[in-house]
Image: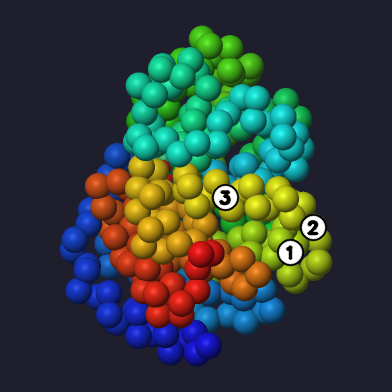
Amino acid sequence: MKFQALLEEIYNEVQPLFGQGQVADYIPALGKVDPRKFGISIQTVNGQSFETGDANEKFSIQSISKVFNLAMAIRIVDEQLWERVGVEPSGNPFNSLVQLEHERGIPRNPFINSGAQVVIDILLEHLDNPNEEMLSFVKKLRYEDVYYNDAVFQSEKEYGYTNQALVNFMKAHKNIMHPVDTVLDVYYHQCSIEMSCHGLAKSFLFLANNGIIPDTGERILTKSQTKRVNALMLTCGFYDQAGMFAYHVGLPGKSGVGGGIVAVIPEELSIAVWSPELNTYGNSVIGMKVLELLTTRTGKSVF
Ligand code: GLU
C-alpha cells in the first residue's frame, strides 16, 4: 500500500472543507489556534512512518488524553473499574449533567467528562502524583516530547463551571472519593496536554498491536484489555457522533476539541489527524473526512 501517495491525495482533496467548522472557543487559550493547521501521521506496527502537513506541530490533545487515563487505570484496577463507570455510548453531549442525574452519578463511559473524572478519582487512590505519572506513561509509549500547556490548564480551570458541577454531583452520589478540586486539577491537566500528530500516532501504536509497544516489546495491556479499550473507542470515542464515525470510518478512535483525532487499524497501524475546525458535535470536520477517505480507499476497517 502506497500510504504516502494516498495521504498526499487525501490531504489535497479535503482542502475545500476548510471554513466549514469552528475552532473551539469555550476557553480563550484554544480559540487562538490557526484554523488552517492540518497534519496527518501514520505509524505502522512494523516501524514505517508516513506524514504530511503539520504532522510535527503540537496542539492541545484535550479529550484524547482520556484514552491514556483509561489505559493507566485498567493497568492498575482492571475490571474493578466498571463498578464505577459504564461502557455504553452516551448519545449525549460530553459534559451532559442531565444523563448523570438520571443515572445517579454513574457515568455512561470513560470518554465523557464525568467518566474520565471518575477514572481520575480511581487513579488518585493508587498514584501519589497522577500528573507526573501521566507524562511518564506517554513517554513510555515512545514519545518524549509531551507536556502540559499552562495557559490551557489555567483557562480550563477558570472556565470549568460545568466540570465542577459534574464532579460535585458525582461526589453527592458517592462516586467521587477525593476532594473535588484535587480531581479537577488532574482533569484540567489532562485536557491541557500538548502533542503532535506524530506523537499521538506513535503513542497509540500499542492499541494497534494487541497491547504491546512495537518498538520495545513491552506489554502495556493484555490482549483482552486492548480489545476492550478499542471497543470503547469505537462505540464512545466521538461524543454523540460515535455512531456516525463507526458508520463512515469503521475504526476505533478518539477525538478531542483541539481538533485532533487518533484511530487504529488493529494489527497494522495508528493514524492521527489534526485540523482545529470542529463540527457541532466537537469533532474535527477535516479529520473525520480524512479518516473516511482513508478507510474507503484502502478498504481497511475493523469490519
Ligand atoms: N476540556 C474539555 C472540557 O472538559 C473537554 C475537551 C474535549 O472534549 O476534548 O470541557
Q: Specify which label sits upstream in the sequence, 1 or 3.
A: 1
Which residue appears at 70% of the width and 40% of the height?
74
* Residue at mark 2: 219
Would you say 127 lies left or right of 252 here?
right
**Front-lying residue, 177 or 236:** 236
The residue beneath circle 3 is 231
Amino acid carrying label 3: it is: Ala
What secondary structure is found at the residue carrying circle 3? helix
Q: Furthest residue to the top? A: 172
Closer to the eye: label 3 or 2: 3
How far from the left and from the top, in percent, is residue 17?
22, 69
Tell me the kind of residue under disc 2: Arg
Q: What residue type is labelled 1?
A: Ile
Residue at image coords 81%, 61%: 218
- Crowding near pointer 3: few (<14 within 10 Å), some, many (20+)? some
Give the number of the mark in front: 1 or 3: 3
Residue, disc 1: 213
Choose top left, top right, bottom left or bottom right for residue 118: top right
Q: Distance between the residues labelled 1 and 3?
A: 19 Å
Q: Residue at x 74, y 55 (%)?
A: 223
Residue 184 drawn at (x, y percent): 52, 28
Circles 3 and 2 in contact, beta carbons < 8 Å: no
Splitting the image into four quadrants, where does ligand 1 fall? top left
Give the Cα distance between marks 1 and 2: 6 Å
Viewer-closest of 166 and 264: 264
The residue sitting at 41% across, 64% down in the picture is 249
Residue 49 vertical placement versus 140 (above, below): below
- Structure colour scheme: rainbow
Asked if 117 appears above or below 293 in the picture, the reply is above
Q: Position of residue 63 (x, y in %)?
A: 47, 45
